[in-house]
């Protein structure tokens, strides 16, 4: 016990230790470095990476904790001393030579940015064994482009035409600052374009620039030129030649002539590809062909190789893909011969999961077990079966736990095929990377003391990527969900199935059939698999549309249905839902430096019931608040509109839903270390109904007043980044609460913590 007390005391006196305790006489602790620049557009944070010496690390609140830890022990006589020295940080001593190098590196960077006459003056203030270093950067007048020309047309007309059509030759124009990074980025873009047009051996060093700085005061004439290969008068375009695929056979055995003769190999030619398989064929040739884009006769492109890697490695049974390319000349034509080796992985996969739950104080447990066969039909198909179950102990005075508890169980099966099974689809679409067709079916049972509810699901889904994986498509031609409630208690029926009490909830619990079609499109302006660097402002866009009821409506219009006693059209004697739903979501971020980022997010959603539906199905309506919405409200506690249940008794869960959703967020993120991150955010948004439902007064969307009904929240958050997992904790406070009476909605001026605070624990960023 005494040892722990001593440790606590030592931690408490960390701040009392002098930071210069272990700084030798005649030396100085590098206490602070600062960069002051008079150049607009080049911030001090952009110049910090060029410093060759930085002070000891520091954290908010605790300061230079690691330096203090290192300063506590005087020797290594005890385990605690050794521990503090190991995890502590020795003092960073000011080094004059490194300061000179840092100033020169900053000057060279400024020169590369077009400030050829830039000056860097270093000021060092030494006091109390501490050194404060300031780098004063004076840019002076930058050099600007007078003329920018190229000589590529006279060297290689084919390359010139390719680059001219893609508008890549005008890298700079008159008046632009002579920034070498712009020229370097231009070389990389032009090289990428050419390598995707067959120029397999082309390197960016084949482009060079001639800059003449003597043409005038602070002016530059730049000429873009092209080097031809030393063994030819022009660069060659390559086509895909022979393609050989080693289909799950150990390549070591193939190279051994003695052992190879004993193998029972099967070699087939499938649409020009030579596929070598063992006695037990690993993958069918058709599956290999539609996931291999290096095909004989095609013009070589780097993106085609990347597509092949991505599609083959994305197949479940393949553990690794190796592609060897060999350039060759045949009949005075240039070809790339490809040898693709597929290494099998584990075909069987079992996963177990157990979670604890706490819903409004009722404890429970949920678990699932899933099995996957990742080469079900020898074509890379993934067959999956998942069993799930959950049990929740509902608070009750009754001793009958089974009848007074909530439990849920179900099963879902799916078959994913790594290609688009649409024979009528155009060839270009069938050849898109990361394509798959998925069929799924599931059934789920929910048992509560009040009712038994059953869900049946069937769906077909097509997914593929395009434009270097920037566009992700998901098409669901037909999805079917059937919801029925075979049993309900009398108390529940009286409370929710009474049209006069709550028709919205009554409709939500009615038996219903949802036959829908949906299309979702995701776009990002960067490609993680490509060669290009991250853009200055990376963003992603998600949009989708869902239409329900068109197929049953078509059938009933042709005489395939009837009208029930409530006036609803039925399909297979079941009333079906009709609605249209659209969503648009955009998120963007901007990094000021490697520690500070600002991110923003806008989400808009609209759903409209029509025809056979007066109200949208409960599962398809929007809700407000929560960890990914307006974080001053808990999940499903915001809106719709100005609706509030303060004077209504009982549960309000069924009324906190709507058909229109708006969400706006701005978040500032600051990294303390590679693991810890702080965030400050402002959120705004709400949900509304598209019709004036009597049970949700004030919830209808109106153009002339919706902006007055936006909920606003602000707060702070902490993130813990484990690389593979990000844990997020956010605390939000209400600033504008549309659920309060007019005149008292701006709670930011009169906060009530118990009323206005919401705590959120989540996985991943909110957007």
Image (tube, rainbow, N blue to C red):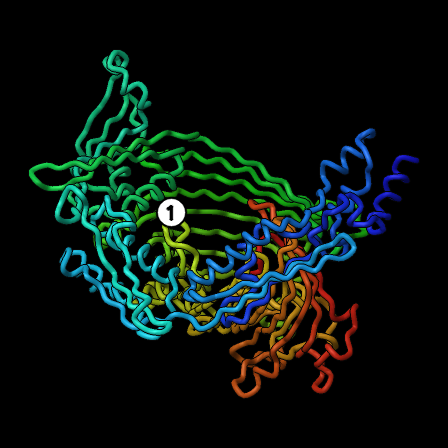
Look at the image and tell me whether residue 628 can be seen: no
Name the one closer to the observer, 450 or 360. 360
The structure residue drawn at horizontal position 40% and vertical position 61%, both measured from the top left corner, is: 525
Q: Residue furthest left?
A: 331
Q: Is residue 471 left or right of residue 9?
A: left
Quarter occupied by residue 643: bottom right
Q: Quadrant of the C terminus?
A: bottom right
Q: x, y (%) of residue 355? A: 65, 44
Whether 436 is drawn above or below 575: the answer is: above
Image quadrant in which the N terminus is located:
top right
Give whichever of 270, 120 is nearer the camera. 120
Q: Residue at x 60, y 52 (%)?
A: 763
- Which residue is tagged 1? 438
* Tag 1 secondary structure: strand
Left/right of residue 514 with respect to residue 166 in the rendered view: right
Q: Is residue 739 above or below residue 65?
A: below
Position of residue 132 measured from the top left corner of the image (x, y, whole percent): 69, 58
Identity of the residue drawn at 32% across and 48% down: 433
Q: Is residue 324 above or below residue 668?
A: above
Residue 235: % across, % down: 17, 48
Corner quadrant of residue 345: top left
716, 370: nearer the viewer: 716
Q: Is residue 458 found left or right of 747 in the rendered image? A: left
Residue at (54, 63) in percent of width and height: 120
Q: Foreground: 9 or 634?
A: 9
Within-10-Å neighbours for mark 1: few <14, some 14–19, many 20+:
many
Q: Position of residue 686 (x, y in %)?
A: 59, 74
**Residue 322 is at least partly visible in this image:** yes
How many numbered tags mark residues here?
1
């Amino acid at each position: 016990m005494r040892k722990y007390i001593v440790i606590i005391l030592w931690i408490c006196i960390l701040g009392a230790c002098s930071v210069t305790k272990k700084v030798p006489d005649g030396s100085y602790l590098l206490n602070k470095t600062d960069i002051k620049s008079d150049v607009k557009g080049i911030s001090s944070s952009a110049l910090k990476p060029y410093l060759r010496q930085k002070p000891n690390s520091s954290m908010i609140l605790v300061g230079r904790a690691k330096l203090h830890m290192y300063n506590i022990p005087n020797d290594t006589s005890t385990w605690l001393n050794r521990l503090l020295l190991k995890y502590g940080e020795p003092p960073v001593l000011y080094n004059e030579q490194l300061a000179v190098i840092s100033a020169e590196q900053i000057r060279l960077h400024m020169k590369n940015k077009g400030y050829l006459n830039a000056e860097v003056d270093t000021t060092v203030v030494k006091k109390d064994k501490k050194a404060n270093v300031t780098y004063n950067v004076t840019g002076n007048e930058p050099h600007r482009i007078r003329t920018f020309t190229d000589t590529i047309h006279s060297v290689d007309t084919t390359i010139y035409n390719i680059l001219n059509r893609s508008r890549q030759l005008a890298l700079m124009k008159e008046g632009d600052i002579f920034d070498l990074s712009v020229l370097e980025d231009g070389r990389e873009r032009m090289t990428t374009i050419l390598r995707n047009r067959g120029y397999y051996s082309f390197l960016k060093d084949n482009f060079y620039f001639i800059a003449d700085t003597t043409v005038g005061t602070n002016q530059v004439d730049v000429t873009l030129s092209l080097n031809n290969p030393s063994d030819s008068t022009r660069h060659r375009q390559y086509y895909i030649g022979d393609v050989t695929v080693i289909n799950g056979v150990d390549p070591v055995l193939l190279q051994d002539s003695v052992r190879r003769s004993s193998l029972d190999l099967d070699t087939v030619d499938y649409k020009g590809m030579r596929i070598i398989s063992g006695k037990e064929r690993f993958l069918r040739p058709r599956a290999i062909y539609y996931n291999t884009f290096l095909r004989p006769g095609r013009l070589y492109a780097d993106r085609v190789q990347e597509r092949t890697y991505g599609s083959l490695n994305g197949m479940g049974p393949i553990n690794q893909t190796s592609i060897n390319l060999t350039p060759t000349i045949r009949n005075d034509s240039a070809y790339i011969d490809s040898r693709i080796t597929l290494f099998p992985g584990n075909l069987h996969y079992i996963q177990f999961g157990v979670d604890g739950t706490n819903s409004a104080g009722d404890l429970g447990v949920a678990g699932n077990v899933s099995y996957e066969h990742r080469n079900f039909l020898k074509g890379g198909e993934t067959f999956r079966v998942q069993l799930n179950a959950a049990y929740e102990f509902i608070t009750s005075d009754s001793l009958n736990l089974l009848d007074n508890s909530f439990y849920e169980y179900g099963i879902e099966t799916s078959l994913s095929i790594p290609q688009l099974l649409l024979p009528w689809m155009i060839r270009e679409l069938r050849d898109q990377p990361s394509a798959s067709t998925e069929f799924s079916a599931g059934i789920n049972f929910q048992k509560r003391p009040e009712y038994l509810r059953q869900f049946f699901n069937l769906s077909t889904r097509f997914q593929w990527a395009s434009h270097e994986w920037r566009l992700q498509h998901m098409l669901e031609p037909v999805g079917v969900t059937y919801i029925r409630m075979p049993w309900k208690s009398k108390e529940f029926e009286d409370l929710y199935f009474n049209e006069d009490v709550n028709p919205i909830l009554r409709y939500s619990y009615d038996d219903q059939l949802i036959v829908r079609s949906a299309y979702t499109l995701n776009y990002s302006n960067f490609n993680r698999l490509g060669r290009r660097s991250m853009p200055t402002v990376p963003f992603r866009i998600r949009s989708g549309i869902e239409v329900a009821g068109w197929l049953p409506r078509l059938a009933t219009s042709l005489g395939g249905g009837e009208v029930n006693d409530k006036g609803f059209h039925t399909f297979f004697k079941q009333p079906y839902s009709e609605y249209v739903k659209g969503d648009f979501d955009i998120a963007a971020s901007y990094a000021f430096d490697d520690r500070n980022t600002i991110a923003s997010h806008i989400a808009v959603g609209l759903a409209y019931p029509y025809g056979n539906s007066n109200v949208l199905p409960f599962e398809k309506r929007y809700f407000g608040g929560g960890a990914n919405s307006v974080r001053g409200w808990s999940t499903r506690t915001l809106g719709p509109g100005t609706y509030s249940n303060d004077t209504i008794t009982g549960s309000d869960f069924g009324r906190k839903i709507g058909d229109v959703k708006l969400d706006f967020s701005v978040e500032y993120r600051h990294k303390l270390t590679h693991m810890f991150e702080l965030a400050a955010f402002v959120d705004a948004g709400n949900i509304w109904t598209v019709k004036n439902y009597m049970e949700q007064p004030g919830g209808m969307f109106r153009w002339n007043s919706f902006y007055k009904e936006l909920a606003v929240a602000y707060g702070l958050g902490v993130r813990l980044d484990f690389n593979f997992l990000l844990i997020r904790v956010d605390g939000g406070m209400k600033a504008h609460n549309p659920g309060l009476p007019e005149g008292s909605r701006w709670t930011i001026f009169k906060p009530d913590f118990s009323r206005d605070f919401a705590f959120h624990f989540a996985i991943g960023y909110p957007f």
